[in-house]
Image: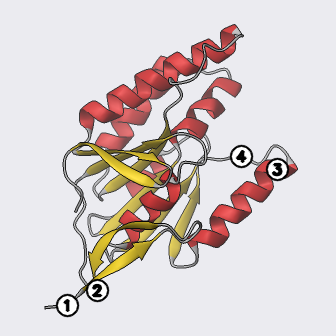
Amino acid sequence: MARPSLAFDRVTGLKLRRIKKNMKKKLPSLTLVLGGAGSGKSAFAENLVCATGRRRHYIATAQAFDAEMEAKILAHQKSRGENWITHEAPLDVSKPLNAALSEDVVLLDCATLWLSNQMLAERVLDIQIAKFLDAVRGTEAPLVVVSNEVGQGVVPEYKMGREFRNAQGRLNQALAAETDLAVFVIAGLPQVLKGQLP
């Protein structure tokens, strides 16, 4: 029997969980990975996806509106490494979700930026959230969705900020209701909210 080895976050070097060498992990049909900014949620989600041994799709929802965001996107791409099929989908995630086959695995990072893109495009958020959830339900491959938990801070000062926070809360709750596995990442440490880690 193979000895367990440690899995490390590629960015921070933190131990994430124990895995056995060469053992492919099976993910449920939908996994939700929540966390605050800089919590390690993206790296944790990437490790979950990589551990499956399947062909990997990455759905990127970020848009580089300034140099800081451009640098953040490049850092994410570098830490991810190669062997990903990347789909740029800031507004419509249905096409790349439909492109994945049942033997693939998909990482969507992240639902929060997707939602903010919808708001900036002045779309009706509840309609777009319903379409997003329909696309998630129709995905054949195991899907990992990364999303920010934005409801633990102070009440936003401006109306738009409050509307966004509330819409993000509705989206996260809807995803959590659909998911088989929900994980909250704090300081790089995964806290299982629902289901069981593979």
Do labels 1 and 2 touch, CB within 8 Å?
Answer: yes
* For discs 3 and 4, the disc positioned in front in the rendered view: 3
Q: Earlier in the sequence, mark 4 or mark 1?
A: 1
| Separation (CA) of disc 1 from disc 2 | 7 Å
* For discs 2 and 3, the disc positioned in front in the rendered view: 2
User: Residue 50: which quarter of the image?
Assistant: bottom left
Amino acid type, callout 4? Gln
Q: Decide if residue 99 is on the left or right side of residue 122.
A: left
Q: Earlier in the sequence, mark 3 or mark 4?
A: 4
Q: Residues within 10 Å of mark 2 (few under 14, many from 20)?
A: few
Compared to residue 30, the image places residue 126 above or below, namely: above
Helix, strand or loop at mark 1: loop
Q: Which residue is mark 3?
A: 68
Q: Decide if residue 104 is on the left or right side of residue 13.
A: left
Q: Residues within 10 Å of mark 4 (few under 14, many from 20)?
A: some
Q: Which residue is mark 4?
A: 63
| Separation (CA) of disc 3 from disc 4 | 11 Å
Q: Which residue is mark 1?
A: 2
Q: Decide if residue 26 is on the left or right side of residue 109.
A: left
* For discs 3 and 1, the disc positioned in front in the rendered view: 1
